Image (tube, coloured by chain):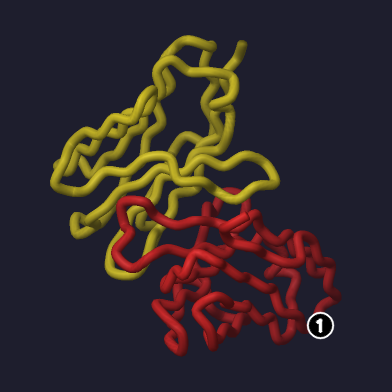
Chain colours: A yellow, B red
Amino acid sequence: DQQVKQNSPSLSVQEGRISILNCDYTNSMFDYFLWYKKYPAEGPTFLISISSIKDKNEDGRFTVFLNKSAKHLSLHIVPSQPGDSAVYFCAVHLGNQFYFGTGTSLTVIP
Amino acid sequence: NAGVTQTPKFQVLKTGQSMTLQCAQDMNHEYMSWYRQDPGMGLRLIHYSVGAGITDQGEVPNGYNVSRSTTEDFPLRLLSAAPSQTSVYFCASSLPGATGDGYTFGSGTRLTVV
């Protein structure tokens, strides 16, 4: 069973607009939620995280929202820039393990 | 540069061959893991280690062996390669309890089994 689902394989957004990436999870015991960014031929890099006791965390243009009742995580990028074009993975943490979603490929159109 | 180093970057194997994917980190991270990335499947955990001498299985451990004799190194062994093991493999490391920062990943090994 997949612990984490990203139902949108791809997303295209105009430069300057908002990008919203979504993630759903199954286990209410997860204690940390993270977003990673991955460029082709590189490893994923950590972007932003949020603990289960919060519902929002901001870091510059990136904001992560956590809706525990809906078991839903989202990443907002405002404003979107062409350099944001990448694959974004959400991840959840429990015990000694991180579980990753299938990824959403974001394309920001200049 | 500090970080996670994976070798080789690319490898082609014949079915039944064996090989070891190398992973080394110089950040004194106790936690290390191996993931594979397949289209439409995301990153799936193969094996992980919480310290030297301690390893455990992840979601997809079959066909892979690991050992952790030092803090720095965490090699992944394929004893008899199969086409289903064609994938991109990522090694990752972190400090214990660094859940808010997640892992530092290597740049990956692209493996093709023919």
At a point 45% along the width and 45% down the height, the residue shown is: A46
Q: Is residue A56 above or below residue B5?
A: above
Q: Quadrant of residue B16?
A: bottom right
Query: For the residue marked with disc 1, what is the amino acid?
Result: Gln
At a point 22% along the width and 48% down the height, the residue shown is: A51
Q: Tag 1: Cα neighbours inside 10 Å, few (<14), some, or many (≥20)?
A: few
Residue furthest to the front:
B1
Disc 1 sits on a residue from what chain? B
Is A53 on the left or on the right of A41, as rendered?
left
For the N terminus of chain A, the quadrant is bottom left
Give x and y (percent) for residue B20: 71, 79
At a point 79% along the width and 61% down the height, the residue shown is: B10
Is A35 on the left or on the right of A14, as rendered?
left
Q: Is residue B11 above or below residue B73?
A: above
Please give the residue where the numbered disc 1 appears in the rendered image: B17
Is B24 on the left or on the right of A36, as rendered?
right
Give the structural element (helix, strand or loop) at label 1. Answer: loop
Q: Quadrant of residue A6?
A: top left
